[in-house]
Image (cartoon, rainbow, N blue to C red):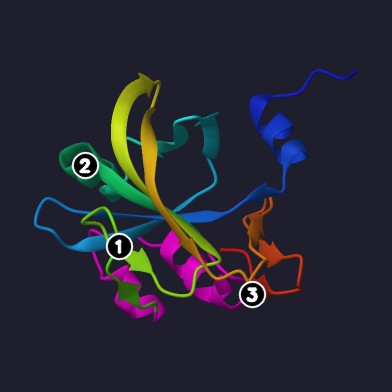
Amino acid sequence: MQTLTPNQGVALAAPMIYSLVTSLDANGRPNALGVSWVTRTSLDPFLLMVSIDHSRYSHAGIDFHKEFVVHYPSAEQAEAAWFCGSRSGRDIDKIKEAGLSLIDSVAVQVPTIEGATVAFECKVIGQFETGDHTVFVGEVVATRGEPQKAGHLYVTSNYEFFSLEGSRVPSR
């Protein structure tokens, strides 16, 4: 085996499932962040964890409100998902600019992206620092989705997005 840099190893591990995480900022304004570092950590209780860079706009909102929603965007949401993952919510309303619609969530204040393949509403039950990121552990308190939209998006090491159904968005 060849010795690799960490970035070379990550590139070989691609593609990764791509998600959008919605949160509220300190003023209650919703934001959507593109995230690939999401994983299940427990089935009972059902827990998800997301790893968010300290510098990201959504980081402060999740830390403040202790809630977030993890969405797996549908294939037809590929361009909007790419848009949300390539801009900062500090400067613009990414959700509006991307053409996404929000609906009320069932169990958290953070809204849900309408039309996502699946959305997991989470309440933060723990968090810890991991270098330049914070891992937020969320208990899933509600799950909704669109079973007829079973596909979701992946991201390559070159930041190209695709679905198994063939949707593709150019790299950043």
Foreground of the two, 47 or 17 = 47
The CA distance from mark 1 to mark 2 is: 20 Å
Q: Which mark is residue 105?
A: 1
Residue 54 shown left or right of residue 79 in the figure: left
Q: Residue at x 11, y 50 (%)?
A: 26
Query: What is the magenta range?
Result: 73-99
Write down the quadrant of residue 161 in the picture: bottom right
Counting from the top left corner in percent of width and height, residue 20 is at 45, 57
Residue 157 shown left or right of residue 98 in the figure: right
Q: Is residue 86 visible?
A: no
| Foreground tag (3 vs 2) | 3
Classify the position of the N terminus by image quarter. top right
Do the residues bearing badges 3 and 1 touch, measured as CB atoms within 8 Å? no
Q: Is residue 67 visible?
A: yes
Callout 3: SS? loop
Write down the quadrant of residue 77 in the picture: bottom right
